[in-house]
């Protein structure tokens, strides 16, 4: 009888452990589904944004709708739209986890070398003013602002070493 009780207790313990493992797996699957769903939505949104941008770049009349900056000649409007696409692509890669904060900083450092991008960035500063200060997009915008300041103040020709990414929470 003692052996039977010990066997039953052991079986119950194994069953309890298996149930805990099963519950942990269920939680993990739910987390992966949420993450994958979010990433799938981000990817779909990026594809649609690219489609709209492609349409606008190919048609000056549509470019006028997509651009919120008045009095731009068609060439400059397309350049600004493309600058926005470069920035948005870097931001989305960061959001999706394809690049980390240091890599994002490096990508932005390259983009900020363009005088046209800097003109675009300055012309759209009022767009970023409405962002919630704690949002990821606002933090990345401040990172870009700091990079441009650092590059402007740098006395080195080696632009690829200028600036440090801000701490994770700035």
Image (cartoon, rainbow, N blue to C red):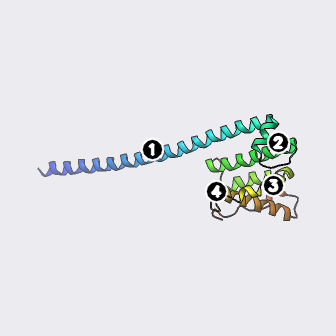
Nearer-the-camera pick, 1 or 164: 164
Question: What mark, if any, has residue 123 been given in the picture?
Answer: 3
Q: Nearer the viewer, mark 1 or mark 4?
A: 4
Disc on the earlier residue, 4 or 3: 3
Q: CA distance from mark 1 to mark 4?
A: 26 Å
Mark 4 residue crowding within 10 angstroms, few (<14) / some (14–19) / many (20+): some
The residue carrying pointer 2 sits among few (fewer than 14), some (14 to 19) or many (20 or more) residues within 10 Å by Cα, namely: many
> Could you tell me how far apart the alpha carbons at marks 4 and 3 are, in whole angstroms?
21 Å
Residue drawn at 32 percent across, 47 percent down: 19
Kind of element beneath mark 3: helix
Image quadrant for the C terminus? bottom right
Marks 4 & 3, CB-CB < 8 Å contact: no
Which is nearer the N-term, disc 1 or disc 2?
1
Q: CA distance from mark 1 to mark 3?
A: 45 Å
* Among the 4 quarters of the image, the one containing residue 140: bottom right
Q: Residues within 10 Å of mark 1 (few under 14, many from 20)?
A: few
Alpha carbon distance from label 1 to label 2: 44 Å
Mark 1: secondary structure: helix
Q: Position of residue 37 (x, y in %)?
A: 53, 42
Answer with mark 1 or mark 3, whichever residue precedes in sequence.
Answer: 1
Picture disc at residue 78: 2
Mark 1 or 2, which is nearer the eye?
Answer: 2
Contact check, label 1 and label 2, Cβ < 8 Å = no
Where does residue 42 sit, x and y in percent of width and height? 61, 43
Residue located 86% across and 48% down the image: 71
Disc 2 and disc 3: Cα gap in Å?
14 Å
């Amino acid at each position: 009888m003692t052996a039977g009780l010990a066997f039953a207790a052991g079986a119950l313990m194994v069953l309890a452990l298996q149930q805990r493992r099963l519950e942990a797996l269920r939680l993990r699957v739910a987390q992966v589904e949420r993450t994958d769903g979010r990433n799938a939505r981000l990817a779909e949104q990026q594809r649609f944004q690219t489609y709209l941008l492609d349409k606008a770049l190919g048609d000056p009349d549509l470019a006028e709708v997509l651009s919120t900056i008045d009095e731009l000649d068609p060439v400059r409007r397309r350049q600004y739209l493309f600058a926005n696409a470069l920035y948005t692509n870097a931001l989305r890669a960061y959001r999706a986890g394809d690049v980390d904060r240091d890599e994002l900083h490096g990508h932005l450092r390259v983009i900020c070398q363009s005088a046209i991008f800097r003109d675009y960035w300055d012309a759209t500063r009022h767009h970023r003013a409405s962002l919630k200060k704690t949002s990821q997009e606002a933090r990345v915008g401040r990172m870009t602002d700091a990079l441009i300041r650092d590059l402007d103040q740098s006395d080195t020709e080696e632009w690829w070493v200028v600036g440090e990414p801000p701490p994770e929470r700035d």
